[in-house]
Image: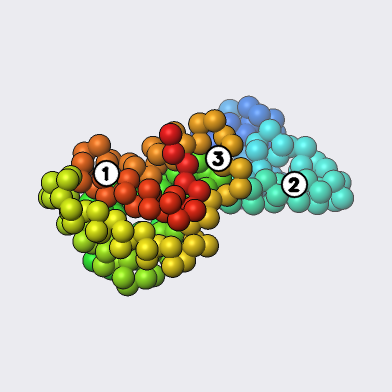
Amino acid sequence: MTDGLTIGQAAAFVGVTIKTVRHYHRLGLVAEPGRDSSGYRRYRSADLLRLVQVRTLAEAGVPLAEVGDLLDADPEPFAAALDDVHRRLTDRIEDLIARRDTLHRLAHGDRVLLPERACATLDRLADLGFEPEYVATQREALVLARALIPEIFDSFLTQLEHSIADPLIVELTKRGLAARSWDPDDPRIEELASALADRLLANRTALTMPAGLGKQSDAAARYELVNHHREDQEPSIARLNALVEANLRAAGIDIPHQ
């Protein structure tokens, strides 16, 4: 290699493009070699070594604006600079992993807006044979609860978890869903509401609301938006839920209401 390599040969040997080599020259990262008698620049081993060093650092994530100072630094600052690059790369990797996980969860619709615990509860609803429309409504209610009244989200979710762990409540809830086809004044709705409230009261702890919620001026409005989500489309379900809440309040459960 006495005469050296052309820019094309140097780029090929190092594994970059000619355009990249010229870009390194423009940035001052690699000095342009001298020309031969024919006017062509000839790259020798020292030039190739510098090209390899610049390419390696760039591929490792070091910004090109920092590569020159890094290569010309003494060993101690060089090591410190590499540590800083390592930290920044780690941050970027963690950010990319979080974005990838978000994209994965986006494939499941609103699940991206809910924690894993809530998603597991929704999966359990489906496993128990609840129809997709009901599961979707519960998902929407959980999303609303987390956004509108985050202070009761855990309580809201805990109550749902306890309910689906009780076979009788599951059975009564499914009977309640069947009530959608009933007339709102059907006496069976009142009977079903009483049975549901009695069963819920068997575990009063799960019905406890966070202290101080009732003191918030708009707490009742936010709670009703969540707890009565989509009831405007189902008058019988609206009456059933209203009766259940009335029975719970009569038993001393503090449920926000307007």
Q: Specify the quadrant of the image occupied by residue 179.
A: bottom left
Name the quarter where the C terminus is drawn: top left
**Residue 53, horizontal then vertical, whole percent:** 67, 48
Please tell me which residue lies in front, 73 or 222. Answer: 222
Amino acid type, mark 3:
Gly
Q: Specify the quadrant of the image occupied by residue 165.
A: bottom left
Q: Is residue 123 above or below residue 61?
A: below
Q: To which residue does mark 1 refer?
A: 238
Crowd class of label 1 (few under 14; some 14 to 19; many from 20; radius 10 Å): some
Under tag 1, what secondary structure? helix
Q: To which residue does mark 2 refer?
A: 84
Query: In the visual, does 161 lie left or right of 15?
Result: left
**Residue 37, horizontal then vertical, whole percent:** 61, 30
Chain-order first, disc 1 or disc 3: 3
Under tag 3, what secondary structure? helix
**Residue 138, horizontal then vertical, whole percent:** 33, 51
Query: In the visual, does 158 lie left or right of 238?
Result: right
Residue at image x 18%, y 56%? 188
Residue at image x 15%, y 50%? 186
Q: To which residue does mark 3 refer?
A: 214
Under tag 2, what secondary structure? helix
- Count the numbered circles shown: 3
Q: Is residue 124 above or below residue 55?
A: below
Please tell me which residue lies in front, 64 or 234. Answer: 234
The answer to whether any part of residue 225 appears in the image is yes
Query: In the visual, does 109 lie left or right of 24?
Result: left
Crowd class of label 3 (few under 14; some 14 to 19; many from 20; radius 10 Å): some
Amino acid type, mark 1:
Ala
The answer to whether any part of residue 98 appears in the image is no
Residue at image x 38%, y 45%? 227
Query: In the visual, does 27 lie left or right of 255?
Result: right
